[in-house]
Image (cartoon, grey):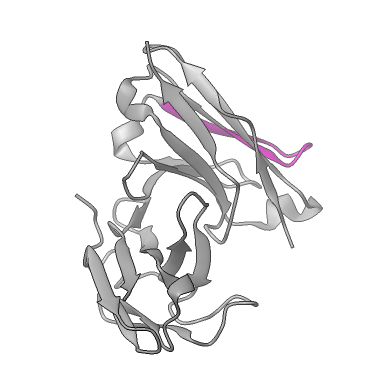
Amino acid sequence: QVQLVQSGAEVKKPGASVKVSCKVSEYTFTSYNYMHWVRQAPGQGLEWVGAISPSAGNTAYAQKFQGRVTVTRDTSTSTVYMELSSLRSEDTAVYYCGTDLTVWGQGTLVTVSS
Amino acid sequence: QSVLTQPPSVSAAPGQKVTISCSGGSSNIGTNYVLWFQQLPGTAPKLLIYDNDKRPSGIPDRFSGSKSGTSATLGITGLQTGDEADYYCGTWDSSLSVGVFGGGTKLTVL
C-alpha cells in the first residue's frame, strides 16, 4: 500500500511563502496520472489547489491561486512540493497531497499569523 | 460556492439507509468519473468510491456509488454510529481543467 508522508506544520507571517513536501513511498511514483494538492480551512470543506503529472511535469492550478502557487516534483526522490507565496490569513489551512486523489497524505497545517 | 452541489446534512437511524446526492454539470460529472470520500473529524479524507461505483479494497459493500447524467449518488446501508462523518464528492472539470469538490455533507446517525 502506497504511503504519502508530508512535511511538518508551518507558521508563517503574512506576505511570506511556504513550501510543503509530500514523499511517495514507492518506486511507481511516475505511474500516477497526477499528484494533487487540496486544502481545508478550519471548519470548511475541501478545496482543490493544483496538481502535477509526476512523469511529464505538466501542472494545473485553480484559478484562485494562479500566480501564487507552484507545484513541482523531484522524480529522483519521489517527492512533490507545493509552494504558496504572498500568504494571507485566509491561507491558514491543512494542506493535503494525494495520488490521483485516491491515497492521501496525513496533511500539513499551515498557519498564517502576524 | 462549490462547483458540485451536495446537501449540507443528512441523518438517519442506525441500521437504516441514507443517500447523498452530488449535482454538477456536463463538463465535470457529465464527462468524468466521480470519487466519494469520507472524512472523520481530525483526519485526512479517505476514498470510499472511485470510477463512479467501484470500492477500493477494504471498503465494505454497505457503501455504493452511482452516476446518472450530471449527478452522482452515494448510498450507505446498515448505518452505524461509526459512519458519522463528512462526505465529499469530487471529480475533474474538463472545461476548467481543474479538480472540483462538493461542499460536503455531514452525516448524523441518530
| Left or right side of B20 for A59 | right
Image quadrant holding the C terminus of chain B, namely bottom left
Q: How many marks?
A: 0
Is residue A18 visible in the rendered image? The answer is: no
Q: Residue at x 24, y 66 (%)?
A: B9
Residue A10 vertical position relative to residue B68 in the rendered view, above or below: above
Q: Would you identify the image quadrant in which residue A113 lies? A: top left
User: Of B95 and A108, which appears nearest the observer?
Assistant: A108
User: Is the magenta region chiefly helix, strand or loop?
Assistant: strand
Q: Residue at x 31, y 60 (%)?
A: B104
Residue A30's spot in the image, x, y percent? 70, 51
Residue A80 vertical position relative to residue B98 in the rendered view, above or below: above
Residue B108's spot in the image, x, y percent? 32, 70
Residue B109's spot in the image, x, y percent? 35, 75
Q: Which residues are magenta?
A: A69-81
Q: Residue at x 32, y 44 (%)?
A: A43
Residue A71 is inside the magenta segment: yes
Q: Residue at x 46, y 38 (%)?
A: A94
Q: Residue furthest front?
A: B110
| Left or right side of B66 for B23 | left
Residue B49's spot in the image, x, y percent? 48, 74
| Left or right side of A5 for A10 | left
Is residue A20 visible in the rendered image? The answer is: yes
User: Of B75 and A69, which appears nearest the observer?
Assistant: B75
Residue A21 is inside the magenta segment: no
